Amino acid sequence: MVAFPDTKKTYCFDAFPNIEKVSKITSPVLIIHGTEDEVIDFSHGLALYERCPKAVEPLWVEGAGHNDIELYSQYLERLRRFIGQELANQHT
């Protein structure tokens, strides 16, 4: 998926076959991806979100690359909200 972002399956050399595993996740998932990621194409994050049965509202960080996403204020804000919501859900 990383080497060939338009594929629908992973190859034996793909170190991160997430796309094939994401449908099995049973806990809430927050997908965060930079729109200008130069290492893993944005389409990979979008595909994970679309295939994840427990995905919550994702965070697409406009202008963020692969190694600078934590520098954007919305990154930490969205993480805090996600964790807060999950903690609250555990107590209900």
Image (tube, grey):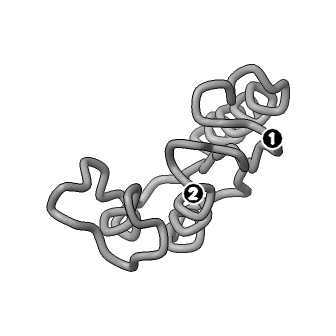
Which quarter of the figure has residue 24? Answer: bottom left
Question: How many circles with numbers are drawn on the protein?
Answer: 2
**Three-letter amino acid code of the residue under disc 1:** Gly
- Residue under label 1: 63
Mark 1 Cα shell of 10 Å, populated few (<14), some (14-19), many (≥20)? few
**Three-letter amino acid code of the residue under disc 2:** Gly
Q: Residue at x 74, y 36 (%)?
A: 64
- Residue under label 2: 45
Gap between marks 2 and 1 measured at Cα: 14 Å
Secondary structure of residue under mark 1: loop
Task: Give percent across and percent down for residue 78.
Answer: 76, 36
Question: Above or below — where is 34 with respect to 3?
Answer: above
Q: Residue at x 59, y 26 (%)?
A: 67
Query: Comparing marks 2 and 1, which lies closer to the viewer?
Result: 1
Residue 43 seen: yes
As rendered, which of 41 and 83 lies closer to the eye?
41
Q: Residue at x 50, y 73 (%)?
A: 51
Question: Above or below — where is 51 with respect to 87?
Answer: below
Question: Above or below — where is 53 with respect to 73?
Answer: below
Which circle's residue, 2 or 1, is located before the other in the chain? 2
Residue 92 seen: no
Task: Give percent across and percent down for residue 87.
Answer: 62, 34
Answer with left or right where residue 86 lies relative to residue 12: right
As rendered, which of 5 and 27 lies closer to the eye?
5
Task: Give percent across and percent down for residue 92.
Answer: 64, 46
Answer with left or right where residue 74 lies relative to residue 34: right
Which image quadrant: the N terminus?
bottom left
Which quarter of the figure has residue 45? Answer: bottom right
Q: Residue at x 75, y 25 (%)?
A: 76
Which disc, if any, is residue 77? none
In this view, the residue farthest toward the left is 12
As rendered, which of 76 and 38 lies closer to the eye?
38
